[in-house]
Amino acid sequence: MEKVDREFQIFAKPVGALCNLRCKYCYYLDKRSLYPGEEALTMTDGMLEKYIIQHIEATTDETIFFSWHGGEPLMAGIDFFRKAVAIQKKHKPAGRTILNGVQTNGTLIDWDWASFLAEEKFVVGISIDGPGDLHNRFRVAPGGEPSLSRVLKGYDILQRSRIRSEILCVVNSYNVRFPLVVYNFFRELGAKYITFLPLVEKRQGTKSGVTRASVPPDEFGRFLISVFDEWVERDIGEIKIQIIDKKYIYNIKATRNQSGLLKAPVKGSMDRRIAESIDAHLTLNVTDKHDNVIFNGSTVISGLEMAGDIDKLKESKSGK
């Protein structure tokens, strides 16, 4: 019987919209109103086991990945996650691997949490929007108090515990004006993995159709260009930025020319700088005369794909 490949991702929310912060741009807090009169929203033991079994059965990859989100998922408590891991181990098929990732605001992380997360090899995403007011403008406690100092305390514990962590930064109309302040702050924190997410909040009746906090597309593009230029100069191979290091920036249709080389039009300075960076590190050719990028060999790259991953392109160039 032919094996079926089925890639998917599920964000499990063990406490629904429950959260100890009141981030001004959060799209999920009002979901709490879907359960009027309900005090405890934590996923029941029966639902937890049923979900884990179905998730395992649906996954075709050798590695089975669980993503825990919220709200603030850590509000479910350590015992909930201990239970989840125990159920996963109980139902894990032979020869398969189970991994867990949790996305948190970081304010609840202490040494007990760190001990558990390290022992069970969790990957932790932590939300930070930059230093000082770049973070605190939107990410606040229920009483409006700033949250950054508590977040950084949790992040420091993760780092000291050598837990693999990724910073998730929501780029909005305020912090978008300070790309290098944001990026250099993350570098100083010792970040190795960074994701930049553009804030887009719909609002009917406005000319733009979105809120003032939403990031304008052109400004988000300039933000990424500034971060890319800094990353190219200092951090290739040291820091992974998802939107740059993967294949999410442009979708350039590649075609072969008569000489058998692969040609793709370059539509912006960022594209060219990406291509020149790849050229410098992987000895690929860039032709500025016709505003094209030419790739020698059989590696097909759509949207420059940042090689899907720079390391993978190195392997393809070396014939591995």
Image (cartoon, rainbow, N blue to C red):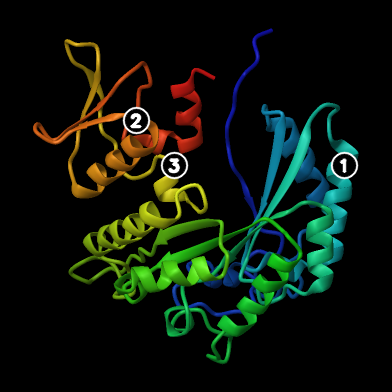
State which quarter of the image contains the C terminus. top right
Cα separation, mark 2 vs mark 3, equals 19 Å
Q: Is disc 2 placed on a helix, strand or loop?
A: loop
Nearer to me, 40 or 211: 211
- The part of the image, by quadrant, that contains residue 114 is bottom right
In the displayed structure, 216 sits above or below 251; it is below
For badge 1, the amino acid type reads Lys
First of labels 2, 3 by sequence position: 3
Q: How many marks?
A: 3
**Which residue is tagged 1?**
89
Residue drawn 77% across the image and 75% down it: 110
Percent across and percent down for residue 294 are 24, 26
Quarter assignment of residue 260: top left
Q: Residue at x 87, y 55 (%)?
A: 83
Q: Amino acid at mark 3?
A: Lys
Task: Give SS at disc 3.
Answer: loop
Q: Which residue is mark 2?
A: 283
Q: Residues within 10 Å of mark 1 (few under 14, many from 20)?
A: few
Cβ atoms under marks 2 and 3 closer than 8 Å = no
- N-term-proximal mark, 3 vs 1: 1
